[in-house]
Amino acid sequence: MIRVGFLLNYNPKTWLGGFNVKKNLINSFKQLNQKKIEAFIIAPNSFKKDYKNFKISRNRIIFTDFFENQSSLFKLFNKLLIIFFGKSYIYDDFFKSINVKVVSHGLNFGLGLKSAIKSISWIPDFQHVYYPEYFSYRVRILKYINTLFSAISSTKIILSSNDVKKDLQNILPFKYNKIIVHPYIFDLQIKKKIISLNKLIKKYDIKKNYFYIPNQFWKHKNHDIVVESLRYAKKIDKEITIVLTGFPYDHRHKDHFGELNKKIKKYNLLKNYIYLGVIPYIDVMSLMYHCVAIINPSKFEGCSSSVEQSKSMGKKVILSNIEIHKEQNPPRRHYFNPNNHKQLTKILVKTLENYNRKQDIKFISGAYNCINLRLKKYASEYQKHIVKIFK
């Protein structure tokens, strides 16, 4: 059995999508008949307070402060060891002590080609290339250095889409042979655990027919167009309700969330734009289950978790027409220009007018019936990549 550690070297509260990808992949291994890998999340001790909220078993987590208290100088020293000597004895000794043979999905984390521990570095996207204005010059340089470091020091680089693969090939064309493309597939909550619509309405004070956006409030997620779309809907005398959840802070644009709220009050949209905060995962899935459709207006994605969750649930999705959304290609979708709020409004109005809950339930039931087969394939493909590394 190959013991794989999924490294949690970032705060899961500020990037729930990234954590959910790892948790979901680990949980998908339950579907395998012949298991050749054993997977764990490697997390800081501070995560003990929160892990139950993330719906992952305690015996699937290795708690350690090894990474939590590392200084920048210590990290630099180990990176230099890896670059010049092909491995860090300090890191190797640590992973050997917890009997981990593969470190997977660490952000820009490679252990060197001479390391006894295999490393699969995860690069979610290259947003800094497409939207440099969202990043300082220093951060853009560091991101390029981290990409180069991952390419040099990792056994493999895992990507979530062919769109990201194309970007990496343009940036580092000499590292094609290290790439693994492994698109997400998300599991579903057991139907019995889905919270009823009446309970959601009572708990969150929302209306019956609502659209749902489960995105973090980073500026590129394009919540601005949602506000403008709702404003336009009022002008044409159409009533639309959009429920939103997600972490409300963008460290690159600290005033972004506050500016959105000012617009909402100014345009008198408090009853139409309903933000619920960061809520339990079962509530997120329940809101998806009962909504009219899920919206992702983002201007950039590496691979959208909310789109993949929608696909797993068989839900209708209203998407910006960016390339990655076209690659993800959900069966029930409508695309719109992420800079055209009127086009978005027209799609929302039409979707709401044609909404048929009985038909929606049929699609959801069909998705539930085939989810285990999809997860089995997802887990099997990852396991094949791991086994292949050791051949």
Image (cartoon, rainbow, N blue to C red):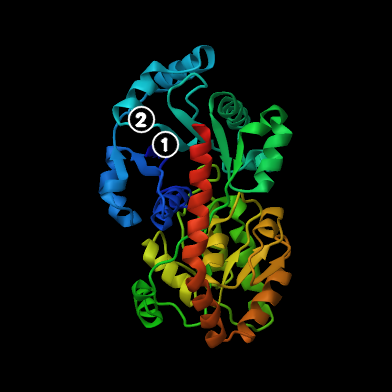
Q: Is residue 316 above or below residue 187?
A: below
Q: Where does label 1 land, which residue?
A: 9
**Type of the residue with mark 1:** Asn
Tell me which corner region of the image, top left, top right, bottom left or bottom right, holds residue 178: top right
Q: State whether residue 78 appears in this view.
A: yes
Q: Is residue 132 left or right of residue 122?
A: right
Spatial separation of the CA atoms under disc 2 and disc 1: 7 Å
Pick whichever, 74 or 308, lies toward us.
308
Q: Secondary structure at mark 1?
A: loop
Q: Is residue 29 above or below residue 75?
A: below
Q: Residue 297 location in percent, x, y?
A: 63, 61
The number of numbered discs placed on residues in the rendered structure image is: 2
Tag shown at residue 200 = none
**Residue at the farthest top position:** 84
Q: Is residue 85 above or below residue 32?
A: above
Crowd class of label 1 (few under 14; some 14 to 19; many from 20; radius 10 Å): some
Q: Residue 84 location in percent, x, y?
A: 53, 12
Tell me which corner region of the image, top left, top right, bottom left or bottom right, holds residue 3: top left
Residue ID at (67%, 81%): 350
Crowd class of label 2 (few under 14; some 14 to 19; many from 20; radius 10 Å): some
Q: Secondary structure at mark 2?
A: loop
Q: Is residue 35 above or below residue 214?
A: above
Determine whether label 2 and label 1 are within 8 Å by CB. yes
Residue ID at (51%, 82%): 361
**Type of the residue with mark 2:** Phe
Pick whichever, 162 or 377, lies toward us.
377
Quadrant of the image containing the N terminus: top left
Q: Residue 70 location in percent, x, y?
A: 36, 25
Pick whichever, 368 or 41, lies toward us.
368
Q: Where does label 2 land, which residue?
A: 67
Residue ID at (65%, 84%): 237
